[in-house]
Amino acid sequence: DIKWIKDLVCLKKCGMSIQEMKDYLALCLEGPSTITRRKEMLSVKREELLSSIQELESCVDYIDWKQQFYDDVLSGKRPYVSNLIASK
């Protein structure tokens, strides 16, 4: 039972909905004949996770760039330019 709970917690962290977890569990209970379908479910979730990772990496890259921009402005290496404030 503890193993099942740990598995379900992991699937939830992977972004599976309660319904997807119910479907996955139902397939598990059917036995080995559903392994292919379970693998497909996990493969789809894996691709979604990889896509999310790429999006998050892009966000981190932006923050790193923005931090460097601010460091350069504060150190006098470059002037401050904003696309939100009109130049005078």
Image (tube, rainbow, N blue to C red):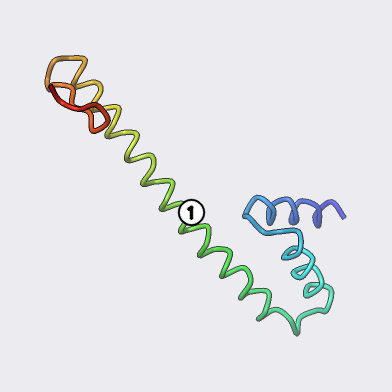
Horizontally, residue 34 falls left or right of residue 62, namely right
Give the image quarter of residue 67: top left
Task: Answer few, some or many: residues within 10 Å of disc 1's Cα (few below 14, many 20 plus, some between 14 and 19).
Answer: few
Q: Residue furthest bottom?
A: 33
Q: Amino acid at mark 1?
A: Ser
Q: Compared with residue 69, is residue 2 higher up or lower down, i.e. above or below?
A: below
Left or right of 47, for residue 39: right
Give coordinates of residue 43: x percent, y percent: 57, 70
Q: Tell how many labels.
A: 1
Q: Residue furthest top?
A: 75
* Image spot of residue 55 (x, y percent): 42, 51
Q: Residue at x 77, y 70 (%)?
A: 23
Foreground of the two, 46 or 52: 52
**Quadrant including the C terminus:** top left
Question: Which of 12/84 is in front?
Answer: 84
Quadrant position of the N terminus in the picture: bottom right
| Residue drawn at x 82%, y 72% as measured from the top left | 26
Residue that label 1 marks: 52
Relative vertical location of residue 35 with respect to residue 13 in this rendering, above or below: below
Q: Quadrant of residue 80?
A: top left
Task: Name the residue located 75 percent from the left edge and 56 percent from the top edge.
Answer: 8
* Left or right: 56, with 38 as reference point: left
User: Camera-side residue: 9 or 65?
Assistant: 65
Image coords of residue 45 (percent x, y): 58, 64
Q: Secondary structure at mark 1?
A: helix
Q: Residue furthest right?
A: 1
Residue 87 in percent (x, y) is at: 15, 25
Q: For the point 62% across and 68% down, which residue is it?
A: 42
